[in-house]
Amino acid sequence: DAVSGEEIKENSPQVKSLITKEDFELYRNCGFDVMSTGITPYYGTDYENSFVYKTLKLAEDKGLKVIVLDGRLLDLCNSEVPLVGSGRKFETREKLDEYVESCIKEYRKSDAFFALNLRDEPKYTAFPAISEVYKSLNRIAPEIKVFINLLPLVENSVTASCYAEGGTSEDIEGAYLKYLDSFTQATGLDYIMLDSYPFCESADGSCTRMNR
């Protein structure tokens, strides 16, 4: 579920309860114009009966846009080794492009399709693979918006090790700056995205720094 961070399956009660005409009417009336398929990834099977298809159709009817989470691209972006090259998952950049294009071919036709959510809170070790997928998308369909939600700045030793090799809580800001620099250098993106929880409470105060 959303609290534990686990994937919610397409046929779960949580998902079915969110894709009704009444719900989408409510979303629009509340002022929302873009929504997300959240943490329910689409893996390419039975498209016209999928959660993504139903979401896009309802969004079209209500004039909303949708950010899609594609499980196949997510799996690529979870890799901590490069994707392209001799002995890698794809021998050439062209082979990667063919695969990525086959993933997006159905839902990109929808007028409601707005963007792809590639990865949520990656470690720095995933940046090479994320970069390859992002650049592949940019070659195939440069008009598609891409979201990669980075880790926020949180002061503890666990997150410090996710920011940079040898990162420590003693120099958390230095590690985080390396994290951001590594991301922008790898992807070439000129913007970053991260969560902010203005109403977050925690016993150890770990939310304090990222809310500044």
Image: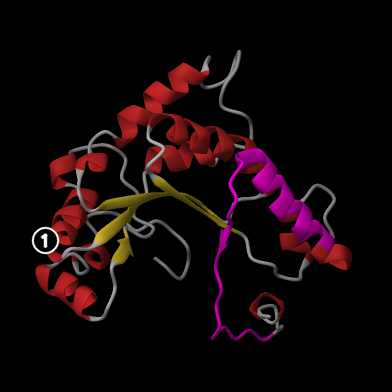
Specify the quadrant that holds the C terminus: bottom right
Q: Sort mark 1 into few (<14), some (14-19) or many (20+) by Cα contacts within 10 Å.
A: few
Q: Is residue 202 magenta?
A: yes
> Which three-letter amino acid code belongs to the residue tagged 1?
Asp
The picture places residue 59, in percent across and down from the top left corner, at 18, 60
Front one among 159 and 142? 142
Residue at the limit of the structure toward the right, as seen here: 170
Which residue lies under the disc numbered 1?
Answer: 61
Front one among 149 and 7? 149
On the image, which quarter does residue 176 sit in? bottom right
Q: Is residue 90 magenta?
A: no
Q: Is residue 95 left or right of residue 114?
A: right
Tell me the residue at 50%/38% (across/down). 134
The picture places residue 167, in percent across and down from the top left corner, at 82, 55
Q: What element carries label 1?
A: helix
On the image, which quarter does residue 65 sit in? bottom left
Tell me the residue at 35%/29% (across/down). 101
What span is colored magenta in the figure? 174-203
The picture places residue 74, in percent across and down from the top left corner, at 45, 43
Above or below residue 50? Residue 35 is: below
Tell me the residue at 89%/67% (across/down). 170
Front one among 2 and 27? 27
The tally of labels here is 1
